[in-house]
Image (spheres, helix red, strand yellow):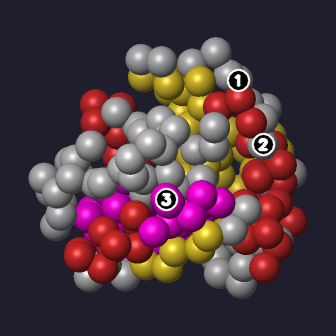
Amino acid sequence: MRIIAGRYKGRVVPSPKGLDVRPTLDRTKETLFNIINFQMPQAVVLDLFAGTGQLGFEALSRGAESVVFCDVDRRCTQSITEFATKLQANCQVRNVSYDAFLATCNDKFDVVFIDPPYQSGVYVDVLHKLCHFKLLSQDALVVCECARDTVLPETVDLLTKYDSRQIGTVRFEFYKLLEEEK
């Protein structure tokens, strides 16, 4: 998988051998970033369930200020760390479960990518914890990547779904804070 646009365009994001990850296909990733590209400049981004880190690296390439990559698999976080070092990218890498990370995080994020294993069923829990721990900036965008037949709730805690897009076998659900919570 390659970085599609921006300062790191064309760089190949490595994937550790033997790792059972489902990287977002280039065409799907390009469509996603065409939808959200206006959010990238100077954004503080969280790539939760990062896997190879390609969503976070694409965000950095397109002007994000910084990215926090979080994944429970040490092989993933080691690979992300090595690639980030090569790029001299402004990021942090956390090798911890999503719930432990969210419970101890003190940052506020402008863009959050939630891309867990599709069958995990953790989407609502993650959305709730992002609100509970007050980890979202006022105009935050939360993007859930899920299987095509998955439909997430219209509202979760302080978040409301404002868009949903199906691209091939993938569905993206887009959330923002409710207006009265801003």
Badge 2: residue crowd in 10 Å (few <14, some 14–19, many ≥20): some
Q: How far apart are the alpha carbons under marks 1 and 2?
A: 13 Å
Q: Residues within 10 Å of mark 3 (few under 14, many from 20)?
A: many
Residue holding disc 2:
122
Which residue is identified by label 1?
151
Q: Position of residue 168 (x, y in %)?
A: 41, 17
Residue found at x 50% / y 25%? 170
Work out which residue is located at the far left of the displayed protein and give it: 10
- Residue 25 position, x and y percent, is 34, 33
Q: Given this view, does label 1 or label 3 mark the residue nearer the observer?
A: 3
Q: Is residue 57 left or right of residue 98?
A: left
Q: Residue at x 23, y 76 (%)?
A: 86
**Magenta stretch, residue numbers:** 54-78
- Check disc 3 and give the amino acid type: Cys
Closer to the N terminus: mark 1 or mark 3? 3
Query: Circle 2 sits in a helix, a strand or a loop, which is it?
Result: loop
| Label 2 close to label 3 by CB (< 8 Å) | no
Is label 1 in a helix, a strand or a loop? Answer: loop
Q: Nearer the viewer, residue 104 or 31?
A: 104
Q: Quadrant of residue 181?
A: bottom right
Q: Quadrant of the N terminus?
A: top left
Q: Which residue is mark 3?
A: 76
Q: Is residue 160 left or right of residue 107?
A: right
